[in-house]
């Protein structure tokens, strides 16, 4: 029989003096407090987090522009909550709305604020006015609100050329004010340009800036180079396509896969362009190179596609808008760069978050948004596989069903594949089960298709079945027949039994990530606990009992 050690014997404890017990309690408490402080506020951990944040800032991202010509616009606090739900971490405002900037405080959302065109003359004419603007709109909020940039005006050279001479002075005055506030390394200053300031944009190698603006553009680029700021460009493949129909294929503008014969080839560089946006970005790089500027990156401050217009704009459709913006997001997150600079992927701000229904005609002006003003989606973005950005409330409640008007034999073949090699859960469409009725190929195929679609995590291409399936946001459940993607629950038993079929791949990944984080946290706590116990046990033998 193993003899108990004196340190663990009840009698041994009674032999210790009261002061020794107090000392032990104090010693252990001190060790626990020290250990907790070390794990929560270690300079090494803090430095690591800061480094991670800096590395994340360098990664290409997709942000959104937020215009406010919207009836019933969300309140600032609701807007910020909506941005957080949608995992939107980069936004651009067309002003410096104080209520929105306050609401953004202590969030991880990074914001570019703007100087409206009508304020450029005043700021460009007075250093005092510039300093006041920075103090009121930047210093007052930073760093609680993560202001990362100032966009001075918007397409000034082409929309308000009378303000052009004071554009650079305004930028320089604002920069001087940032330097005085010691914020010039955190907040970058530039000005967004229209694509039309670049002439002869294709082939990109022949592009150059409009020479009538050289006296302004060259010193501006030199300033951007000196301060490490980006060249902001508003680039719209939509307008390139509309102005060059018959020359630029629609597929090129929409980032659709192309055969080599349809790719655009620059005859001077032999670089192949599979989409219009990359060609526009490289046109900007070549234009800068012609002015001996090679170290300024392009930031796309606007790009998008309208979802509705009048008869003069027949390609402004929901399908094209969905395709363009979905493929744009994937293109940025693929980090493949451009043919000229494959090592550099430009970040892009989508135009825009909300339909600005108060905008003046044409109709398309009010229909560039991803969402309506009430935050409901205008259309369904297909961004599976592109992280969590814009994935919530646009893809979580979607279903895959059979298309109307499909030949029953073709549909039956797709159904057989889904229930066979596709490994869909087809038990509910068997005789006697809840989804057997109505007993027809289309209904059964819809259930099987949705089962496969949900099982694959609603991934891109998982709702196709050789063109006989389509995605819908309308829950196809009926009566007691609950589709796999539905949030309805008949009873807890069914929910548990079918959980492996109803949970999406994305849900499983989130669960795994959450579990891993909890396990990691518990491991850390246990590690600290055992180190404290071990140290205490080593120390106790040296204590002097009464």
Image (cartoon, helix red, strand yellow):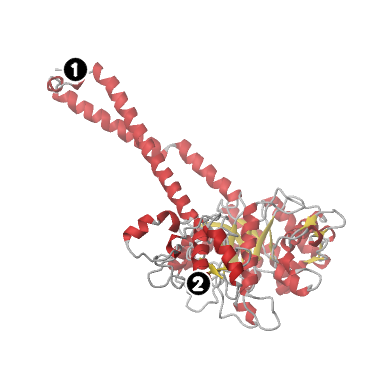
Residue at 24% across, 17% down: 541
Classify mark 2: residues with Cα within 10 Å, few (<14), some (14-19) or many (20+). Answer: few
**Residue extending furthest front?**
431
Residue at 51% across, 55% down: 423
Q: Which of marks 1 and 2 is in front?
A: 2
Compared with 13, 246 (above or below) is below
Q: Quadrant of residue 297?
A: bottom right
Position in image of residue 333 (x %, y %): 62, 54
Left or right: where 295 falls relative to 469? right
Q: Which mark is residue 47?
A: none
Left or right: where 428 falls relative to 535? right
How many numbered marks, from 0 up?
2
* Mark 1 residue element: helix
Quarter of the picture containing the N terminus is top left
Label 1 and label 2: CA atoms lie apart by 79 Å
Q: Quadrant of residue 386?
A: bottom right
Position in image of residue 95 (x %, y %): 56, 68
Q: Is residue 106 visible?
A: no
Residue ID for mark 2:
440
**Residue extending furthest right?**
268
Q: Is residue 271 visible?
A: yes
Q: Residue 6 carries which label?
A: 1
Position in image of residue 190 (x %, y %): 66, 60
- First of labels 1, 2 by sequence position: 1
Residue at 60% across, 59% down: 62
Q: Nearer the viewer, residue 91 or 459?
A: 459
Quarter of the picture containing the C terminus is top left
Position in image of residue 399 (x %, y %): 50, 66
Classify mark 1: residues with Cα within 10 Å, few (<14), some (14-19) or many (20+). Answer: few
């Amino acid at each position: 029989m193993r003899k108990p050690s004196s340190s663990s014997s009840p009698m041994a404890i009674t032999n210790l003096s009261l002061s020794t017990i107090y000392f032990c309690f104090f010693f252990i408490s001190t060790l626990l407090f020290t250990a907790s402080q070390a794990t929560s506020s270690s300079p090494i951990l803090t430095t690591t987090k800061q480094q991670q944040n800096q590395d994340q800032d360098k990664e290409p991202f997709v942000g959104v522009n937020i215009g406010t010509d919207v009836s019933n616009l969300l309140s600032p606090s609701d807007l910020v909550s909506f941005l957080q739900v949608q995992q939107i971490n980069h936004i651009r405002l067309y002003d410096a709305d104080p209520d929105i900037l306050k609401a953004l405080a202590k969030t991880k959302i990074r914001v570019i604020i703007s100087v409206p065109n009508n304020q450029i003359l005043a700021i460009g004419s007075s250093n005092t006015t510039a300093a006041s603007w920075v103090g009121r709109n930047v210093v007052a909020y930073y760093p609680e609100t993560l202001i990362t940039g100032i966009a001075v005006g918007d397409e000034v050279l082409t929309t308000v050329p009378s303000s052009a001479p004071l554009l650079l002075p305004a930028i320089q005055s604002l920069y001087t004010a940032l330097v005085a506030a010691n914020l010039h390394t955190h907040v970058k200053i530039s000005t967004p340009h229209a694509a039309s300031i670049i002439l002869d944009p294709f082939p990109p190698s022949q592009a150059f800036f409009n020479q009538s603006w050289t006296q302004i553009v060259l010193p501006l680029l030199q300033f951007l180079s000196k301060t490490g700021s980006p060249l902001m460009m508003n680039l719209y493949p939509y307008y390139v396509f509309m102005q060059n129909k018959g020359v630029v294929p629609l597929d090129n503008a929409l980032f659709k896969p192309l055969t080599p014969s349809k790719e655009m080839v620059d005859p001077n560089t032999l670089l192949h362009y599979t989409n219009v946006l990359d060609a526009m970005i490289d046109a900007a790089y070549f234009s800068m190179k012609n002015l001996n500027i090679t170290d300024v990156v392009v930031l796309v401050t606007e790009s998008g596609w309208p979802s509705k217009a009048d008869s003069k704009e027949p390609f402004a459709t929901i399908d094209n808008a969905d395709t363009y913006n979905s493929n744009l997001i994937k293109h940025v997150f693929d980090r493949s760069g451009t043919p000229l600079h494959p090592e550099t992927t430009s970040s892009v701000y989508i135009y825009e978050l909300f339909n600005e229904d108060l905008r003046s005609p044409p109709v398309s002006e009010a229909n560039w948004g991803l969402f309506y003003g009430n935050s409901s989606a205008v259309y369904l973005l297909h961004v599976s596989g592109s992280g969590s950005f814009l994935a919530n409330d646009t893809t979580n409640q979607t279903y895959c069903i059979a298309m109307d008007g499909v030949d029953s034999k073709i549909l039956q073949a797709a159904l057989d594949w889904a229930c066979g090699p596709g490994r869909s859960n087809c038990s509910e469409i068997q005789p006697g089960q809840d989804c057997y009725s109505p007993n027809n190929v289309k209904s059964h195929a819809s259930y099987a298709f949705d089962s496969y679609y949900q099982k694959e995590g609603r991934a891109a291409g998982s709702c196709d079945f050789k063109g006989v399936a389509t995605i819908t946001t309308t829950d196809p459940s009926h009566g007691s027949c609950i589709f796999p993607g539905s949030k309805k629950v008949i009873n807890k038993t069914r929910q548990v039994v079918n959980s492996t079929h109803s949970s999406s791949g994305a849900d499983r990944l989130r669960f795994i990530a959450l579990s891993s984080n909890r396990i990691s946290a518990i491991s850390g706590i246990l590690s600290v606990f055992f180190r404290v116990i071990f140290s205490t046990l080593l120390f106790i033998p040296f204590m002097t009992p009464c």
